[in-house]
Image: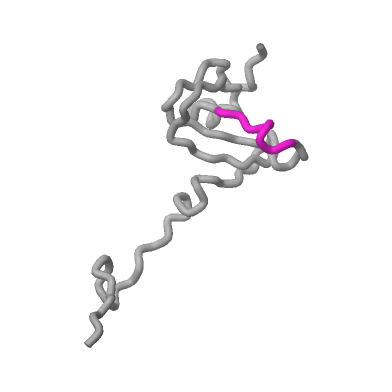
């Protein structure tokens, strides 16, 4: 007689857990602001340092931050991504990018 192959992770008849949309989309979301349309992705950390356009300081390797790029202006996607500190991204409406 064949064995039952029912999963033991979720008991039979129970509802599946709700879908975590942020996890399913890789943390990407679309944002609309006075400065344009943006795709924003939260990143846990990376293996290299980036310069934040909001404060002109270094986003250290391994630091959680935000990667954002404009969608309302046609450009070369990867080249236009910018790595921001999360606080700088939230405050970009109150203060403009720094000049180098």
View extreme (front): residue: 1
Counting from the top left corner in percent of width and height, residue 40 is at: 57, 40
View extreme (top): residue: 100
In the displayed structure, 15 sits above or below 56; it is below
Q: Residue at x 50, y 24 (%)?
A: 48
Q: Residue at x 63, y 33 (%)?
A: 81
Whether residue 99 sits left or right of residue 41 in the image: it is right
View extreme (bottom): residue: 1
Residue closest to the eye, 56 or 47: 47
Counting from the top left corner in percent of width and height, residue 29 is at: 56, 46
Q: Where, by quadrant of the figure, is residue 34 drawn?
A: top right
In the displayed structure, 16 sits above or below 61; it is below
Q: How many marks?
A: 0
In the displayed structure, 23 sits above or below 97; it is below
In the displayed structure, 63 sits above or below 100; it is below
Whether residue 26 sits left or right of residue 98 in the image: it is left
Magenta stretch containing residue 22, yes or no?
no
Whether residue 29 sits left or right of residue 1 in the image: it is right
Colouring rule applied to residues: one colour
Bounds of the magenta segment:
76-83
Counting from the top left corner in percent of width and height, residue 61 is at: 45, 23
Q: Where, by quadrant of the figure, is residue 55 drawn?
A: top right
Can you say which quadrant of the picture contains the C terminus?
top right
């Amino acid at each position: 007689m064949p064995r039952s192959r029912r999963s033991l992770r979720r008991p039979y008849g129970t509802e599946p857990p709700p879908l975590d949309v942020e996890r399913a989309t890789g943390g990407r979301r679309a944002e609309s602001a006075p400065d344009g349309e943006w795709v924003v992705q939260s990143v846990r950390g990376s293996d290299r340092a980036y310069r934040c356009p909001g404060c002109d300081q270094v986003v250290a390797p391994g630091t959680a931050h935000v990667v954002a790029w404009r969608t309302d202006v046609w450009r070369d996607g990867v080249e236009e991504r910018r790595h921001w500190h999360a606080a700088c991204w939230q405050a970009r409406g109150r203060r403009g990018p720094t000049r180098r």
